[in-house]
Each structure stands twice: as structure tokens, then as C-alpha cells.
Amino acid sequence: MSVLAPGLLIAAPPLDDPNFDRSVVLLASHGKNGAFGWVINGERVMSLSELATHAGLECDCPPSSTSVYLGGPVGREQVWLLYRTEERLAACPDQFDVGFGITASPSQKVLEAICRATRPSRCAA
């Protein structure tokens, strides 16, 4: 079996699947049980401060600082934060290294740290 993850998958035109048309996918894992990754060039759906408001958090970041993108097509109700591995939070166990110096987390603790303007300093959600 070839190793596809970590890696980037770029949709070949024309792809007859509207979920992946013109998509770039950051593939975190791939194996006999399936694959896991994020569409990293999805549609912008809100700002990070709007996401914080939806999560019931106050955010010190400027309203337009970071955008939140639709990453689906599976699990669109789940929020994943992608950020530099060098900015991992020591006290948060729900983080994993994707590769390419990128760490991912679904943890609200990471979102709270971002909203307090501590770490990570830059992320994509």
C-alpha cells in the first residue's frame, strides 16, 4: 500500500463530485480503515470571533482576524483548529501532529487559548 498521509490531495479537473470539486485536502491519515483530512480551501463561513461567540466565549482577537472555513464534506458540525506544531499547548492532550509542521485539535481548550490571545498565534478553523 502506498503512503498518502500526510499529504495534499488536489482534485483533478473535472471531478464529478461536488464535495471535492476544485478542492485541496490536507490528508492526516490513510489506511485500510479509511482516510481522514480537511478541505483546506473551503468556503469562508465566519470569522474566529463569530465562532467564539457561537461557542459562548469572549474573544480578544479582532473581528476579522482569522477566518473559519468549511472543511467537510463529512462531519461539518465538528470544528477542527489547524495551527503550527511549534505552538502546541502543553496542557491540552487533544492535539495531534498532522505533518508539515501542522498540528490539529478539536479541543475547545485550544479555542479558548486562541480567544485569550495566548497560543496559537495563527490558526485556521
Image (tube, rainbow, N blue to C red):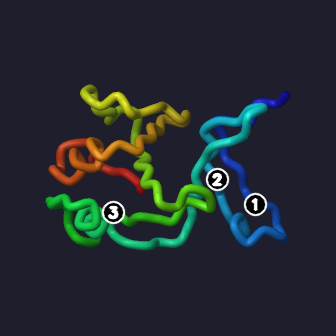
Q: What's the residue at 23%, 71% (across, down)?
A: 63
Disc 3 crowd, CA 10 A, few/some/many (<14, 14-19, 20+): some
Q: Are marks 3 and 2 in contact (CB under 8 Å)?
A: no
Q: Specify whether residue 20 is in view.
A: yes
User: Splitting the image into 4 quarters, where does residue 7 fall?
Assistant: top right
Q: CA distance from mark 1 to mark 2?
A: 8 Å
Is 116 left or right of 35, judged from the image as shown?
A: left
Of helix, strand and loop, which one carries label 1?
loop
N-terminal of the pair, mark 3 or mark 2, is 2
Mark 3 secondary-structure assignment: loop
Instruction: From the image, tell me which residue sits under label 3.
Output: 66
Q: Nearer the viewer, residue 34 or 12?
A: 34
Question: Could you tell me if the residues under marks 1 and 2 are in contact, i.e. CB atoms within 8 Å?
Answer: yes
Task: Residue 11: give its label.
Answer: 1
Q: Is residue 36 above or below residue 42?
A: above
The amino acid marked with disc number 2 is Val
Q: Quadrant of residue 99?
A: top right
Seen at 33% across and 69% down, the residue is: 47
Instruction: Say whether residue 120 is visible.
Output: no
Q: Position of residue 14 (x, y in %)?
A: 84, 71
Depicted 97 relative to depicted 63: above or below: above
- The quadrant of the image that shows the N terminus is top right
Circle 2 sits on which residue? 25
Rendered image: mark on residue 90 = none
* SS type, badge 2: strand
Distance between the Cα atoms at labels 1 and 3? 25 Å
Q: Earlier in the sequence, mark 1 or mark 2?
A: 1
- N-terminal of the pair, mark 1 or mark 3, is 1
Give the distance between the C-alpha atoms of the residues marked 3 and 2, in whole angstroms: 20 Å
Q: Residues within 10 Å of mark 1 (few under 14, many from 20)?
A: some
Q: Amino acid at mark 1?
A: Ala
Q: Quadrant of the C terminus?
A: bottom left
